[in-house]
Image (tube, rainbow, N blue to C red):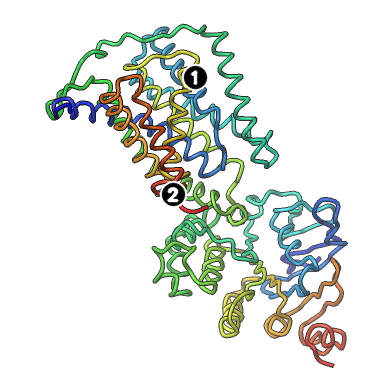
Amino acid sequence: MSNDTMLLVDGLRAGYGAVEVLRGVSFDLAKGEIVALLGSNGVGKTTISSVLSGLIPAWSGRIVFDGMEIQTRTPEAIVDLGLIQVPEGRHIFPNLTVRENLELGAYRRGKPNRARNLDRVMDTFPRLRERARQKAGTLSGGEQQMLAIGRGMMAEPRLLILDEPSIGLSPLLVEEMFSLIGTLNKDGLPILLVEQNVLQSLEIADRAFVMENGEIRLSGPTATLMDDPDLKRSYLGLA
Amino acid sequence: MPDMAIIVPSVLNGLTTGALYALVALGLTLIYGVLHIINFAHGALLMLGLYAVYYLNVQFGIDPYVALLIVPPGMFALGYALQRGIIGRASHGRDENILLVTLGLAIVIENLSLFLFKSDTRIIDVPYSFEVVEILGAFLPLPKVVAFAGALITAALLWLIMSKTDLGRAIRALAKERKGAKLVGIDVEHVFAMSFGLGIACLGVAACLLLPSYYVNPQVGHGFVLIAFTIVVLGGMGSFVGALLGGLIIGVVEALGGLFFGESLGQLGIFLIFILVLVFRPTGLLGHKV
């Protein structure tokens, strides 16, 4: 593992009850990179996110984040290290205001710079500033997604996991979301992009891993993968 | 029809009692709103608080109002430990388990108290027990006026904690969105226990404010908890303002009921209201649809 490695997942197995969902998944992500973790519904992508954040335990295998093994740490210890997840389905706090949601993003990390970061996030998402005093549950789907990402940014992430950020958004907003991901990455923030939206993810990511049935099926630089006949057939609908 | 000279004192009296009911109900609604626990041990814990105030006074000569510095923090610690050590562990995430665990706790606490403190009803003797204050031409016992003010201040403090601090925000966040809370690094078990502790600390405050004008025996919690449940349903499950408003309303209804129907039927009005609310507005005055 090189010094540039931000995240290394090695032989990860995990599941729910007796059902094994991840059957030995390995992938890595270098500093400054966008890596896409692709695959259709039910292949275990969100399970990986959950294990990475410590929400469900790893059965075996290693997760190394910036040189530290984290597979046995609690969710709050993982947040402390700066591995921040923006979950699928947003999971914002509907009963709190937009502002309170963002403030809670810095519950453990980034507290000293909370005011400055709050300003920065609201500059990135002017919509959130307009609605700062509104209950988050009243926001539209797109706004909730922005809020979820903004809440993640408040923790000053060192690696951001974006789980299905484009799900449920209109095509126009999906476009906007992907260009935003590019912007977030420009300053060097490494991003693990967990997505079903294969084509657009490949366009923005540096490398990608394609999952099938709890295993990595294909991997490589996105430019190469785009020409892969298997991928073309199964995910892009091209012959 | 009794004239105003009787009704005004009665209403004021009801408000002072109601504020204390509200305090008990605030703890209950906080615990319900965040942990979704219907805490059957609430009354038993209030009783423990009252005994703490009683023994601090009798053994060490500590005034109940000075005990405000000791009993609420102690009750907070007890609540924190109960949630973290017993209720949270035994529940295994199932609501019906929690129900039985808190009920079991209530039974254990009450019977231990019977054993340790005996079933005698006890009161304390403080110099200001029978002092009165004149308000709007009505003479109210000083301890009740203090209790009223103290309950409102506590409610305001609780509101400040809930709306202005990270802990409060975390508590409210956790009440609705557990996964999101974990992902911002909120330690779920700790915040649950803090919520339970705060709810039980309210009982500690109530105990200090109550004892100068009340009594304690091992069953004293029952009456309060029944009324507190009514208030929580009346105000809307989990609603803070609802609990406060509900408490005051119930206090006044009880006082006026006592005035018109006689002391023994005073509580009739409370449960009449309870039934009416359940029939016509089951979400409570300020509650939301679940």
Counting the numbered discs, the total is 2
Chain ID, mark 1: B
Question: Would you place residue A86 above or below residue A231 in this image?
Answer: above
Q: Position of residue B27 (x, y in %)?
A: 46, 35
Q: Earlier in the sequence, mark 1 or mark 2?
A: 1
Task: Determine which residue is flagged by label 2.
Answer: B287
Question: Would you place residue A144 above or below residue B96 in this image?
Answer: below
Q: Nearer the viewer, residue A57 or B89?
A: B89
Image mark for residue B122: none
Q: Residue at x 52, y 6 (%)?
A: B118
Label 1 neighbourhood size at 10 Å, few (<14), some (14-19), many (20+)?
Answer: many
Q: Position of residue A150 (x, y in %)?
A: 52, 67
Q: Nearer the viewer, residue A2 or B189?
A: B189
The residue under label 1 is which amino acid type? Leu
Q: Are marks 1 and 2 in contact (CB under 8 Å)?
A: no
Q: Position of residue B205 (x, y in %)?
A: 39, 27
Q: Helix or strand or loop: what does disc 2 sit on? A: loop
Task: Determine which residue is flagged by label 1.
Answer: B48
Q: Nearer the viewer, residue B240 or A57?
A: B240
The residue under label 2 is which amino acid type? Gly
